[in-house]
Amino acid sequence: MMKILAAGVVPLLLVLHWKPGAGSPLPINPVNATCNTHHPCPSNLMSQIRSQLAQLNGTANALFILYYTAQGEPFPNNLDKLCGPNVTDFPPFHANGTEKVRLVELYRIVAYLGTALGNITRDQKTLNPTAHSLHSKLNATADTLRGLLSNVLCRLCSKYHVAHVDVAYGPDTSGKDVFQKKKLGCQLLGKYKQVMAVLAQAF
Amino acid sequence: MWMSKTWLVQAFFIFITTESIGKLLDPCGHISPESPVIQLGSNFTAVCVLKEKCMDNFHVNANYIVWKINHFTVPKEQYAILNRTASSVTFTNITALSVQLTCNILTFGQIEQNVYGITVISGLPPEKPKNLNCIVYEGKKMMCQWDPGRETYLETNFTLKSEWATEKFADCQTKRATPTTCIVDYSPVYFVNIEVWVEAENALGKVSSNHINFDPVDKVKPSPPRNLSVSNSEELSSILKLSWINPNIKSVIRLKYNIQYRIKDDSTWNQIPPEDTSTTRSSFTVQDLQPFTEYVFRMRCMKEDGKGFWSDWSEEASGITYEDRPSKAPSFWYKIDPSHTNGYRSVQLIWKTLSPFETNGRILDYEVTLTRWKSRLQNYTVNDTKLTVNLTNDRYIATLTARNLVGKSDPSVLTIPACDFQATRPVMDLKAFPKDNKLWVEWTAPNESVRKYILEWCVLSDKLPCILDWQQEDGTTHRTYLRAPSQGPMVRTKKVGKNEAVLEWDQLPVDVQNGFIRNYTIFYKTIIGNETAVNVDSSHTEYTLSSLTSDTLYMVRMVAYTDEGGKDGPEFTFTTPKFAQGEIEAIVVPVCLAILFTTLLGVLFCFNKRDLIKKHIWPNVPDPSKSHIAQWSPPTPPRHNFNSKDQMYSDSNFTDVSVVEIEPNDKKPLPDDLKSLDLFRKEKSGTEGHSSGIGGSSCMSSSRPSISSGDENESAQNTSSTVQYSTVVHSGYRHQVPSVQVFSRSESTQPLLDSEERPEDLQLIDNVDSGDNILPRQQYFKQNCSQQETSPDISQFERSKPASAVSEEDFVRHRQQQISDMVQSSGSGQLKGFQEVSAADAFGPGVEGQGERFETVGVAAVIDEGMPKSYLPQTVRQGGYVPQ
C-alpha cells in the first residue's frame, strides 16, 4: 500500500514542483490554448535555449562520472552493463523536425529528465548522504532543466501558442531496492548524457 | 485530574481579574480613530464620545470636553461640538511625528479628568524605490539592492519580488538591518530571464518599483582568475608569460580580461590593451618589457560581452624578465696626470655606471682596451669605474664595454691624444647661466662634425678644492645643464624609539646623482607641527632624530643636494611608540618588587611584634592552671618594721627581700619573655607613675604574670577584666607606708594556684639553689618595697622591670665585671654587650653557670642603690628567702 502511495505521490509531487509541466499528461492543443505568461518572453529565447543545452551538455559527462563514482563498485567497472542508456519510454526526439516539433519533443524530454533527476536526487540523498558534490551537481542540473523547461514553454506559448504538451515520466524508483535505484539512476544519467549531446546539436 | 483543576482555577482567576480590571478601567468615553497614522502635513480630526453613564455621574456633556495634545491644551477654536456626547478637534498641517492626544472633561467646573488618549503617528507613504539592480556573485545567490527614496518616518517593509515568465518565486523579505538589499533564497538559473521588482509598504501606502527583466547571466560578477603565475623567456628578455586558472563560470560564459602590470617599485599600473584580452583564455604573453626588471601583474575578468560586473582583481604575481646585453655604451673620459716621468704619463680612465634601464642585467665587469698606433692591443678587465694606466706620450685609442651575463654593451671609444697634440678646434663661446633652477652651459659648436662633448666643472669654493665632475653630451647638442640629482633618497626608519628615530637611506645611484652629492637635508614634522630641517653630510647613510614626542606621527622626507640643486625623495611616515622599549617593564617590575618588599617587611614586622599585635587584637586571659603564688614569707614583717628610706636602701635591706617565684610557661621560650619585657619597659616610660589598679598595686604584687609573658602583663594591667589572684601590699605609695601589710588571697573563684596545688614545685627551688646546673624554671628575685620610692603602685610594666633590668644597665655591669674583655666604656658598646649577653641568657635554662650569673646580678642591683626600681631577676642565694 505504501509502495503504491509512494509510487503515485512522489511523481505527482515532483510534477507539481515542476509547475510548467505539472498535472496529467497534456495534449498539444494549439487551437484554444490560453497561453498566458507572467511577462513577455525575451527576444533571445532560442539563444538562451541553446546556451542552456550547451551548459547541460557541457556538464553531463561530469555528472555521469560523478554519479557512477559515488555509487562505488560494481558501477565504475561495469558501465556498459549497468549504466547503458537503456531507458524505456524515453521521449523521442527528431532532430530533423520543425522547430515547433523539436521544441515540443524537447519539452517532453526535459520534463522526463527533470522528474527522473528529481527521483535520482532523492534516492542519492538517502543512498549516498555524504556525496555532497553529487547532490550539488544534481540540484544544479535540475535547476537548469527547470529553466530550460520554462524557456521552451515560453517559446512554445509565445510563438506557437502551444500551452499544453502531454508528457510522460520515467519509472518511479521509490519502491525498488538500493541496487536497482542506483542502476536506474546510472542508466538515466547515461541516457541524459547521450541525449544532451544530440539536443545541443539540434538547436 | 489535579492538573485540570489547576487549570480551571487559573482560568477562573484570570476571568475574574480581567472582569475587575475591565470595570476599573472602563473609560468615560473614547476617541475615534483609535490608532491613527496620518501623513505629515495633512489635516487630522479626532472625535471624543462620552458615555451617558459617565455624563450622568459627573454631570457633564460634550461642552465640558477639553482636548490636550502632548499635555498642552488645544485652543477652543479647534473644537467642534458635534452633539451632546461628542466633541471633535481638528489639526491642520501636522508636522510632529508622534503626538499624544487626550480627551478630558472638566468635572465640577474645574477638575480635569482624563477620559481617553491616543497616539497620533505621522509619516510619509513610501516613495517608489529607484535604481533597482541585481548582482549574481559567482557561486552565490542573487542579491538585489535599490534606493528606498525619502525617509518615511514609519516602519516600511520592502519586498523583492521575482518571477520567470512561467513561474513565480517566493518573495524576498528584507532584513531590518539591510532594508535596501535582499538576497534571494534560490540559486540563480542562467539563460532564463527573470523579472524583479520591489514593493515598499507602510501604514500610509504601498508602491512598487519599476520592473527589471534580465538574464541572471548578465548580472554575474565572476570570481577572479586564480593561480596567476609569471614566467620569463631566456630567448626574449622583453616578454613575460602569464598563466592562470579561469573561474568556474567559464564553462557557462565566455570571458574577457583586464591585465595590468607595473615595475615592482613603481606604483602606476599599466594595462594591456583590452582588445588583446577580449576573449577567453588562460594565458597571455606580455611584450615590450624591459630586460632584467621585476614586474608585478594582476588581472580580472568579466563576461565577454561586457554585461555584468568585473571580478575582483586577482592576487598579484610577479616575475623578472630575462637579462639582455647592456643597451648603451658607458660615458667614458680620462684625466692625465700632468707630471711626466721617463716618457710615460699616468692616465686615469674614468667612466660612469649605466642606469638600471641600460644595464639590462647585473654588470659583471668592464673591459677596457688600449691601442697605440699600430701596436698590439692591451686588455683590462675592471670592476671599478676607473682605471689608471701609464701610457707613453703617443696617441692611444681606448675602448670601454660593460659586460653582463648575456653580453657586452657597444664600445665607448675614446682617443687619448699624444702628448704634443694641439687642439685646433676648441669649443667657442662657452658660457654658463642659471635658468629654471638649473645651471645651463651653452657653447658654439665648431664647424666640423663632433662625435661627443665632455663638460668638466667643479665648484669654486674657498673651503673646498676643485673636484672635477664631468658629463658627456651628444655631438649634436650645444647646450645642456649641469644635472642635479634626478631622484631623491628614499628614507626609512631603522629603529624607532619613544623619543628618537634612526633614519637610514641608500646612497643614490650614480646615474641619478647628476653630480656630487654635497649634503642631505632631512625634513621632518608632525601633522600639526612646523617642519624641522637637519643637514647631514653626504657620507652618511643614517641619522638619528632625537627629542621626538612619543606616540606621534612624523612625516619625513629627504633632499639630496648637489651644487646644482636638490631633489626630494618620497615622504615617509612613522609613529613613535608610547612607551620606550622596556619602559613598561621598568615601571612594573620595581612596583612589584616594592610591593613584595613592603609585604615582606610587613610580615616580618608582624612576626616580630606578634605579641604586641596579639595584645591589641584580643584580650589575654591568663591561664589560671599555670599560675601560683610562690613561697613568700618575708622574714621581717614590714608591719612591724617600717624602714625609712635610708633603711630601705641599706645593706641590711638586702635580706629584706621578698621573693616571688615565677614559673614561666614551660611551653614558652624565655627569649620571647625577655622581648616582651623589654617592650614593656619601653612602654613604662609613658605610663610611669600611673596606677595600674589592683594587679599592680604593689611591688610585692609583681607576680608571675609580669614576668612570664607580655600577655599576662596585659591581663594584669587591665584589672577590671582580669582575675586577681593575689594582691600583696608591701610598701606604701610614694613613701606612704601602709598601715597594714596585707597579704590577701585572691577572691577569685579560679582554680587553685599551682603552688597551692602542687607543693612539690616548691622543692625545686632548693634544687636550683644547690645546683649550678639547669634551672627547672625561671626564678626572679625581687627587691623589697624599699626600692619603690617613686612608684610604689607599680604598673605591670614596672613589674616587668626586673627582666628589663637584666637587659640593661645592671646586666651590663655584671658583664663588665664578669667578662673583663668585653666592651669597656662605650655606651653603645655596652648596649651591644648587653644585647649579646641577653641574647645568650635568653637561652638561660640551657646555659651553664647561669644561676651564678643571676646571683651576681642580684648583688650588682642591690649595690647600685642609685638605681631605683631595679627589679632584678635572680636566683635565690643560699640563705636568702626561701619560698614557703
Image (spheres, coloured by chain):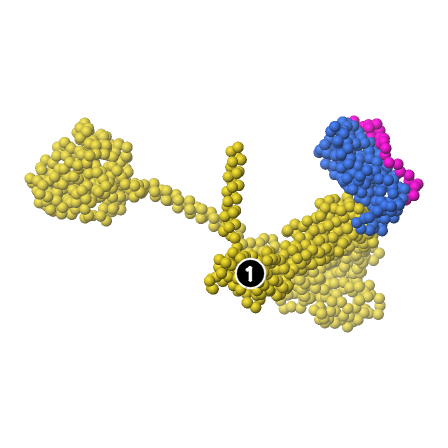
Chain colours: A blue, B yellow
Residue at point 76% right, 34% down?
A: A10
Q: Is residue B426 above or below residue B639?
A: below
Q: Residue furthest right?
A: A96
Towards the viewer: B200 or B595: B200
Left or right side of B727 for B525: right
* Badge 1: residue crowd in 10 Å (few <14, some 14–19, many ≥20): some
What segment carries the magenta color?
A72-99
Q: Is residue A85 magenta?
A: yes
Judge whether residue B455 can be spotted in this image.
Answer: yes
Q: Is residue B655 magenta?
A: no
Secondary element at tag 1:
loop
Q: Quadrant of the N terminus of chain A?
A: top right
Query: Which residue corresponds to the image point at 83% horizontal and 39% vertical from the top-left?
Result: A110
Instruction: Give the camera-side residue of B533 and B85.
Output: B85
Name the spot of residue B64 as percent of width and height, x first.
52, 63
Image location of residue B493, percent across then percent down: 61, 55
Q: Chain of mark 1?
A: B
Quadrant into which the C terminus of chain A falls? top right
Q: Which residue is mark 1?
A: B85
**Residue occupying image coordinates x 51% and y 57%:** B54
> What is the quadrant of residue B859 in the picture?
top left
**Residue B851, can we see it?**
no
Q: Is residue B787 above or below residue B330?
A: above
Residue B334 locus on image (x, y percent) = 75, 60
Q: Residue at x 72, y 53 (%)?
A: B198
What is the quadrant of residue B564 in the picture? bottom right
Instruction: Classify A114 as above or below B331.
Output: above
Give x and y (percent) for residue B753: 20, 32
Q: Main secondary structure of the magenta part?
A: loop
